[in-house]
Image: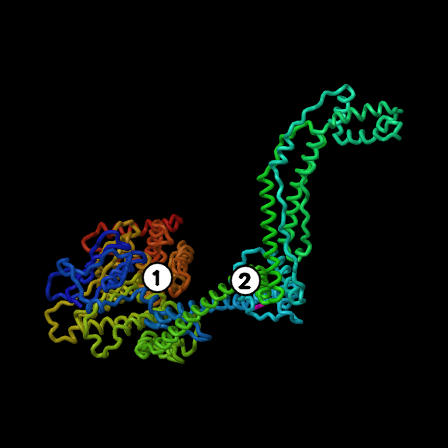
Amino acid sequence: MREDIKSLKICGGKFASEICFPFWGNTTQANKKTPCALLYGRNGCGKSTIARAFRKIAGNEEETINSAKLCGELGNELHLTEEEKSKVYVFDQKFIDENIRFKENGLNTIVMLGSQLELDKQIEELEKKLNEKKDKLDSLQVILDRYNDDTDYKSPKYYLNKMEKKLKGDANWAGRDKLIKNIRINTSVRFDTYRKFISLKPKKSRDDLLVLFQYKYKELESARNGAQRIERDVPTNINGIDIDYINKLLAEKIEKPILSSRERFLVDISKKRGINFLYNIETTFSDKNVATCPFCARTINDNEKHDIVKGIEAILNKLVKEHQNKLDNSRPKKLILDLSPFIKLGELAKVCIKKLEIYNNFIEQIDKQIAEKISNPYQPIFDRLSKLEFDTLKNDLLIHLFKLEEEKNEYNKRISDVKPIVFELNRINAEIAHWDIIEIYKLCKKSMEEKKKNLSLVEDIKLEYGKLKYRKEQLDSKKKNVNIAVDFINHRLNYIFFSENRLKLKYIDGNYQLLVNGSPVKPNQISTGETNAIALCYFFSKICHDKPLEKVYNENYLIIIDDPITSFDNENKVGMLSYLKSQVQEFILGNLGTKFLVMTHDMMTFTSIFHINEELSSVVKDKYANFAGTQLKNKSWLLCDSKLEEYKSNEANEYSRLYNLVYDFAKGSSEASSLPIGNLMRQLMEAFSTFQYKIGITELSTKENVISLLPNEYKNYFRNYMYRLVLNSGSHKENEAKFNLDMDFQSLYTLDEKKRTAKSILCFLYLLNKEHVLAHMWKKSNEAFNKQVEADFNIWCEEIKNKKL
């Protein structure tokens, strides 16, 4: 560590702009050494920021510190080597938090120090992760149990069972396969039978496949039962029809003969009722036996009958009769085909019958037109019959008849060979089974994939769990093997508490257990002061770690200690101060280049260390024969509002100085307003009570033999007011109240209340021993001041009497 370090420049945290603190002096005298600096400052003044600055100098990350520099005598920045940085040690609350932990273990308290604490944090984090993995595995196991439960819809077995059920039974694949194989019981279905059907890609629907299966199965039955062959040929002989000739006859016009009125009447009748009606009339009246007209029911003679017959013969002349004969001869006949032997061939036979029906319907239309022309030969029909349509119908019918013939031939072949039928039936049955199970299979496949995914996740988590568990076992082993200088720490705890059993660490079952007065305690029973004692002992043990003790103090260090003594009773505070003094002395005596900075908010601690600093010079002289000529002067500082003020004191005037400081504050001095006035007033009362009555501060304000010394008009005021000041100053613990008044005094009281308190304390002491107080306030060669002090005291006492204070 560089011996020329004089000051710290810092920016960040409490200090918004860069500020320089000359903790170890800024003198240029070569023979002047300042190894130890002492700093007093109230909570919140920036001591923690200063500690973090030294951490940053040592190489630690400190986000709130913008810059931190060590400087020499002339303010020049000093750069530390890595080795020098490793010798910078900082004791503060952060060190305690990072290096000390108490953990409950049954009725005992386990103490973890330094690397043990870091290992324990890592172990706790691993345990947390292990618990998370365990919880995840447990939750996944619940899901996996569902995947293995064949009654749960999430399980693949659930869908495998459904597919198996869909394939079993008379109406399903197994039943149809029994028919195909011609066996007595349904084919057995295995757990993996479904695999044969899932990859099929049927082109027909399930319903169509079922119809086809029934048709093919009947065909199989016929073949197995020895069904007869169809020996007849499919009739394909269809006579042609001369459509053009028929259209010509229908369009032919027959000229009407010249007729009498009777004949025209008959023609009209023929138009209405057809030419056949005339033939009927002719036949009727040609009969000699007919005497009554069958059409009008009147009597008719032979002459009349003769005239009617002659008239009809005139109408039905030879030309007409010839035309009618041609028409009649051209009338086509319906096609009669016996297709009944081919019905067993199935659908194609039905199609042929339908085609034949359509063909005959067209023939019937032709016949109707011819019949219409025969009935009315004089009226041409120009609505031509379609030859194309006829040819199309005829050809279509012939094509299907030829196909039916081919089907018949195939049928005849199949009767003698069932293998192709069985093969086809198996294919159809498999495709039906595909439709039966495919949707269930999709759900099954999804369930299988989810199960596989969860199984994979379980394996991954198990692997991670195993790695975490192995890592934890390693850390547990490492934690047990951490070598803590327990004897070193216990020896120093004995020194602090003046007892071997008051506070002790004991190694039991791989852990360092804490015993108080020889008995185990719970973590919540350990006080802050006891925690700080262990922490400070461990702090110095870290500096000594892995080094021969006789060589530890010979090295050069920079040691920062922030508020080492808090929450102690008076006896143990003395022990802590004694231990701190021993360490400061050991390190500085070992190497004058070592530098200390001790910071505190406790005035008693500050005063005690101040005296320790004063004693170091003589101690060093006794050790170093060559010290003569070298001036050893340690520094003490007061820090307030980012201002550093050097603190100077000596045994002769310290008590008098307290009177003047409290008096200046009561008067409203601007300089005094920044002082730790609460602790100063308490120190003044402690000194007075000790010097005058050899009692403590509490007894000074409560003991009746002291109160009785006051004039009667002041007794009640001071009896109540001073008791409240001493025991109710904002601290709820009497031990804390003895030495830490200023801790809460600054925040609990207004400035006017603080001034009134200062006046009341001075008046209390003045009324008890006027000459004593004035003697310590007296200033040589300043009679005006001395008179003013006495006048002020009298005015304040009068105000108390009149209750204005």
- Residue at image mark 1: 740
> Number of numbered discs present?
2
Q: What element carries label 1?
A: loop
**Is residue 483 among what the camera can see?**
yes
Image quadrant where residue 265 sits: top right
Image quadrant where residue 104 sits: bottom left
Q: Residues within 10 Å of mark 1 (few under 14, many from 20)?
A: many
Seen from the viewer's position, the closer of residues 318 and 560 is: 318
Task: Name the colouring of the figure.
Answer: rainbow
Whether residue 300 sits left or right of residue 342 in the image: it is: right
User: The N terminus lies in which quarter of the figure?
Assistant: bottom left
Q: Residue 167's x, y, as percent?
A: 60, 65
Magenta extent: 149-154
Seen from the viewer's position, the closer of residues 78 and 725 is: 78
- Residue at image mark 2: 441
Which residue sits furthest front?
318
Q: Which residue corresponds to the image point at 75% horizontal and 25% vertical from the top-left?
A: 314
Q: Is 150 in the magenta?
A: yes
Seen from the viewer's position, the closer of residues 416 and 649 is: 416
Q: Which amino acid does label 2 sit on?
A: Tyr
Whether residue 516 sits left or right of residue 364 in the image: it is: left
Q: Residue 692's x, y, as percent?
A: 32, 65
Whether residue 319 sits left or right of residue 53 in the image: it is: right
Q: Distance between the residues labelled 1 and 2?
A: 81 Å
